[in-house]
């Protein structure tokens, strides 16, 4: 038996899927080129004040033109897997209908470079970039019409790319797309008009669109193409502030409103009871057929994880008009001793172990858990500073040690993809926040691997994880209250 508290050199299974992740709008550039039509993120970026510095994904990492060099870089690092997303509005500029052949060529070329380099593609269908024409036509995710259009888009992807792709992800982090896109308005489409209803409605349609794409794959492609398909959900761990029933109930609500909102319909066939109780008819209902469609609609559990909070009940009481965030009645609290990333997110490795074990226990996901994102933004003022990204290296060592511990404690974890391969367009933060294990100079587009890239590279090559003794591996911690 492994005792990770004493053993600072941690082995991982030989078939563990190590790699890195990106998303289309964050790296591709060529946003108004080669037949691509705008997505809701192009529109959102053009509204003054929405994105830091007026930045956009118009050029980003120019990956659309530099993909061959980027795959070469991944090959040099020895990545086993690469997660990227397909741009819906590049492939189907009208949102539906005839595919753009230049987009088909682009993604097929990317896939063939990956395959000839021995890198396993993990492909996301939707990483937040709805075609703007569908937003204009029927208000995008607020309409049931999007479900058919998403299923059709997915089927085009399976047709065009399914012979190379064995790992499909339908949606990336629907929580962000709904809570930030329709609740706070921080993300596209930037709506906050009806925050007590729209996040729930958009989420309902996302869940159904996900389930229909999965059914389509299983019915028409899985037998011949032999891949698997799942969803990626994001969860920050929530630890009860105190050892009391009120804080434990707040933890349950916090988990339900972020993870359970999506995972419960997929794994249990219903929204969490806490949501049903508190939202009443603002939370849409699934028909019996829809419950059947949703249940079991993920071949693996894709998880993105970044940070942890302590939680206790909210203090504000119910707001005058209902609101997604207030519905939860949760107050998030940080330990002031925690170190923070450049996003202001707390670095709390032990929360990762708790979350992974929670998912294993609560959902026991068939096909296991695939960590599809984890990583951090670090302030890197100069290139020299960036290349010695010791804070990121320590973040990864701490989080990976906890992932290792979760595996030792029974969590079935199949792989780990770091966010992100490249510094890129960090949504409303523009280019000001750098998550890459590879430095990108946005003037010259030069790529340079950072120390963290060498860490990931060593793991890809089968080396054990070395965790310096100053990094805590134990999940025992001293609550600050
Ligand atoms: C992901 O979302 C996205 O999938 C990816 O595109 C993006 O570039 C990447 O992360 C980095 O942002 O305030 O301490 O409680 C991240 C989802 C949800 C993670 C909010 C952090 C708040 C942490 N995020 N969460 S805290």
Image (tube, rainbow, N blue to C red):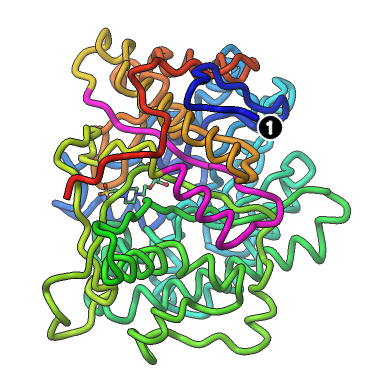
Where 281 sits versus 139, above or below? below
Residue 353 included in the magenta stretch of the image: yes
Residue 258 included in the magenta stretch of the image: no
Towards the viewer: 100 or 255: 255
Q: In which quarter of the image is residue 17?
A: top right
- Residue located farthest toward the top when viewing the structure as drawn: 384
What is the x, y in percent for residue 218? 78, 62
Towards the viewer: 372 or 257: 257
- Residue located farthest toward the bottom when viewing the structure as drawn: 281
Where 204 sits versus 38, above or below? below
Q: Quadrant of residue 187?
A: bottom left
Q: Residue at point 19% right, 18% down?
A: 381
What is the x, y in percent for residue 361? 57, 58
The N terminus sits in image quarter: top right
Question: In this view of the protein, can residue 29 be seen by the observer?
Answer: no
Could you tell whether 163 is left or right of 383 in the image? right
Q: Residue at point 66% right, 53% down?
A: 300
Q: Residue at point 24% right, 59% down?
A: 242
Q: Residue at point 17% right, 82% down?
A: 318
Identify the magenta region. 352-379
Q: What residue is disc 1 on?
A: 120
Towards the viewer: 224 or 230: 230
Where 271 sits versus 359, above or below? below
């Amino acid at each position: 038996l492994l005792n990770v508290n004493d053993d600072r050199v941690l082995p991982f299974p030989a078939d563990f899927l190590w790699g890195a992740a990106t998303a289309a709008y964050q790296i591709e550039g060529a946003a108004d080129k080669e037949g691509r039509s705008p997505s809701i993120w192009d529109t959102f970026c053009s509204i003054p004040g929405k994105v830091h510095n007026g930045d956009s994904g118009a050029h980003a990492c120019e990956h659309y033109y530099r993909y061959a060099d980027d795959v070469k870089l991944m090959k040099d690092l020895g990545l086993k897997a690469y997660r990227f997303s397909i741009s819906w509005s590049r492939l189907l500029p009208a949102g539906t209908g005839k595919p753009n052949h230049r987009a088909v060529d682009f993604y097929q070329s990317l896939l063939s470079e990956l395959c000839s380099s021995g890198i396993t593609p993990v492909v996301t269908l939707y990483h937040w970039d709805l075609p703007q024409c569908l937003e204009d036509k029927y208000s995008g995710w607020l309409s049931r019409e999007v479900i058919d259009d998403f299923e059709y888009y997915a089927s085009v992807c399976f047709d065009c790319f399914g012979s190379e792709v064995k790992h499909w992800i339908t949606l990336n982090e629907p929580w962000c797309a709904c809570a930030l896109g329709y609740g706070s308005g921080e993300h596209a489409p930037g709506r906050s008009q009806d925050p007590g209803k729209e996040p729930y409605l958009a989420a309902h349609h996302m869940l159904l669109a996900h389930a229909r794409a999965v059914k389509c794959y299983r019915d028409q492609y899985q037998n011949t193409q032999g891949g698997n398909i799942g969803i990626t959900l994001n969860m920050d761990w929530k630890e009860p502030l105190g050892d009391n029933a009120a804080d434990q109930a707040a933890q349950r609500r916090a988990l339900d409103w972020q993870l359970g909102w999506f995972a419960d319909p997929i794994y249990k066939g219903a929204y969490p009871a806490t949501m049903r109780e508190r939202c009443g008819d603002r939370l849409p209902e699934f028909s019996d057929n829809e419950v059947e469609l949703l249940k079991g609609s993920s071949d693996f559990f894709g998880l993105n994880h970044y940070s942890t909070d302590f939680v206790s009940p909210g203090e504000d009481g119910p707001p005058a008009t209902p609101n997604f965030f207030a519905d939860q009645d949760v107050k998030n609290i940080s330990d002031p001793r925690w170190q923070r990333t450049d996003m202001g997110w707390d670095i709390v490795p032990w929360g990762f172990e708790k979350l992974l074990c929670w998912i294993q226990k609560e959902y026991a996901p068939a096909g296991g858990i695939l960590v599809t994102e984890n990583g951090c933004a670090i302030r890197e003022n100069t290139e020299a500073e960036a290349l010695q990204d010791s804070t990121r290296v320590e973040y990864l060592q701490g989080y990976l040690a906890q992932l290792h511990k979760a595996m030792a404690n029974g969590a079935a974890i199949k792989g780990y993809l770091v966010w992100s391969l490249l510094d890129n367009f960090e949504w409303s933060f523009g280019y000001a926040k750098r998550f890459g294990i590879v430095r990108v100079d946005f003037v010259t587009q030069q790529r340079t691997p950072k120390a963290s890239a060498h860490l990931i590279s060593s793991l890809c090559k089968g080396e054990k994880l070395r965790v310096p003794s100053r990094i805590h591996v134990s999940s025992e911690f001293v609550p600050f209250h």
